[in-house]
């Protein structure tokens, strides 16, 4: 999880930076020096202080979205400081219970220190890493050309259907096969009289995924459907209601509205997705380069524990009856 959070950190540019300072005109009156963040007290808990400096340090560790919510919401900073104080309150109680002396706490503390130091390192290297993360339009086009298979659109079908479900077994809810066929025949008769397919789907269909949409599945990949339904979607005459199709779910009346052949999505149409994928690839490359460089400098090894030895099963003693028979035979 550390890798994901840290690479997101550098990708989004959430680095510790001081706000730009405005130089006052020479004619402006000299203002009193602002107090240092470490001197501005925001809360006190059990004698410990929470200062503006503490808030700023905690704020820099947040993700970009969390930072924006604190800055944009009225009272956001006050609420965040309150949470900091409440956390310190819980910590004070834990210390009184000497929970800070437990081995589990020490392990967690060591892990937290590692994470914080890793963040500090990425903050220090942030500017250089961000330059490497930049993806140009030429990079995006190159990614698209290298990975054309990722931008192939399969055959797509738009189809409306009415499902009359059949109970799956004895004692299960639903109607019988014969009752389902009778209902299908009733729907077909209403269609012949001029009833609209989508209106009948809303009235009769047992498919919750399409019922309220008039039975429509638009621009769907038929390979994701059960075989009988997918085959009918690929072959049935467009614009006409076909013969009932039996699947594991029951009987379907289907009306294919359109088919689109498979195609390679043009770059301009796929540009946004190609950019997202190219950015992900670049992040992975930058991260791996960083890790490879560090491994050459610092000893690094991931050790897999040896599998536990198999415990031999104890030899079972013969059953009492067979043991007695064996003893009897031996005596003879």
Image (cartoon, grey):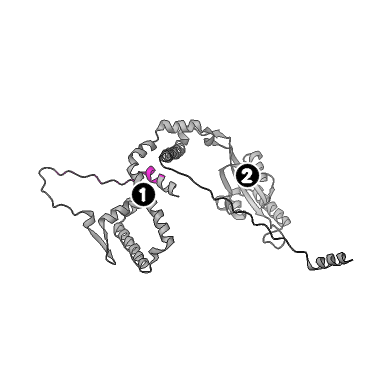
Name the chief secondary structure element in magenta: loop
* Residue 90 location, quadrant: bottom left
Circle 1 Cα neighbour tier, 10 Å, few/some/many (<14 / 14–19 / ≥20): few
Picture disc at residue 222: none
Quarter-of-image position of residue 294: top left
Q: Residue furthest right?
A: 332
Q: Earlier in the sequence, mark 2 or mark 1?
A: 1
- Classify residue 132 as left or right of residue 315: left
- Image spot of residue 307 (x, y percent): 58, 51
Residue 126 in the figure: left or right of residue 196: left
> Residue at left 59%, top 49%?
215
Question: Which residue position is annotated with label 2?
Answer: 255
Tell me the residue at 39%/51% (across/down). Answer: 114
The quadrant in which the C terminus is found is: bottom right
Q: Nearer the viewer, residue 298 or 125?
A: 298
> Could you tell me how far apart the alpha carbons at marks 2 and 1 are, in whole angstroms?
62 Å
Q: Is residue 261 left or right of residue 176?
A: left
What SS does tag 2 mark?
Answer: strand
What residue sits 79% from the left and 68% below the top?
320
Depth check, front residue: 235 or 111: 111
Residue 126, image quadrant: top left
Taking the magenta stretch, the answer to whether it contains residue 10 is yes
Element marked by disc 1: helix
Q: Is residue 267 above or below residue 242?
A: above
Observer-side mark, 2 or 1, equals: 1
> Does residue 196 show up?
no
* The label number, if any, that marks residue 117 in the structure image: 1
Residues in magenta?
Answer: 7-24
- Residue at 51 percent across and 47 percent down: it is 303
| Numbered circles on residues, count | 2
Q: Is residue 124 above or below residue 34?
A: above
Residue at far front of view: 331
């Amino acid at each position: 999880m550390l890798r994901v959070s840290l690479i997101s950190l550098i990708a989004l540019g959430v680095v510790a930076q001081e706000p730009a300072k405005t130089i006052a005109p020479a004619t402006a009156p000299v203002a009193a020096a602002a107090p240092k963040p470490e001197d501005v007290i925001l809360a006190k808990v059990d004698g410990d202080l929470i200062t503006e400096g503490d808030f700023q340090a905690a704020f820099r560790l947040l993700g970009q979205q969390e930072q924006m919510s604190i800055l944009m919401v009225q009272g956001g900073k006050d609420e965040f400081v309150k949470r900091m104080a409440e956390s310190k309150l819980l910590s004070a109680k834990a210390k009184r219970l000497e929970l800070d002396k437990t081995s589990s706490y020490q392990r967690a503390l060591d892990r937290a220190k590692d994470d914080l130091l890793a963040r500090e390192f990425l903050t220090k290297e942030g500017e250089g890493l961000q330059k490497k993360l930049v993806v140009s339009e030429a990079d995006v086009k190159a990614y698209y050309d290298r990975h054309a298979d990722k931008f192939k659109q399969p055959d797509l079908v738009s189809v409306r259907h009415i499902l009359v479900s059949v109970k799956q077994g004895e004692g299960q809810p639903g109607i019988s096969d014969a009752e389902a066929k009778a209902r299908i025949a009733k729907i077909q008769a209403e269609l012949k009289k001029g009833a609209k397919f989508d209106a009948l789907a809303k009235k009769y269909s047992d498919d919750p995924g399409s019922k309220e949409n008039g039975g429509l599945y638009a621009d769907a990949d038929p390979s994701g459907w059960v075989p009988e339904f997918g085959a009918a979607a690929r072959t049935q005459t467009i614009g006409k209601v076909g013969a009932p199709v039996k699947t594991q779910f029951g009987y379907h009346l289907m009306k294919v509205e359109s088919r689109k052949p498979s195609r390679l999505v043009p770059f301009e149409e796929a540009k946004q997705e190609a950019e997202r994928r190219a950015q992900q690839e670049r992040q992975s490359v930058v991260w791996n380069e960083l890790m490879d460089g560090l491994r050459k400098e610092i000893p690094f090894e991931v050790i897999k524990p040896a599998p536990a030895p198999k415990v031999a099963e104890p030899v079972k003693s013969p059953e009492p009856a067979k043991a007695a028979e064996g003893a009897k035979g031996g005596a003879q």
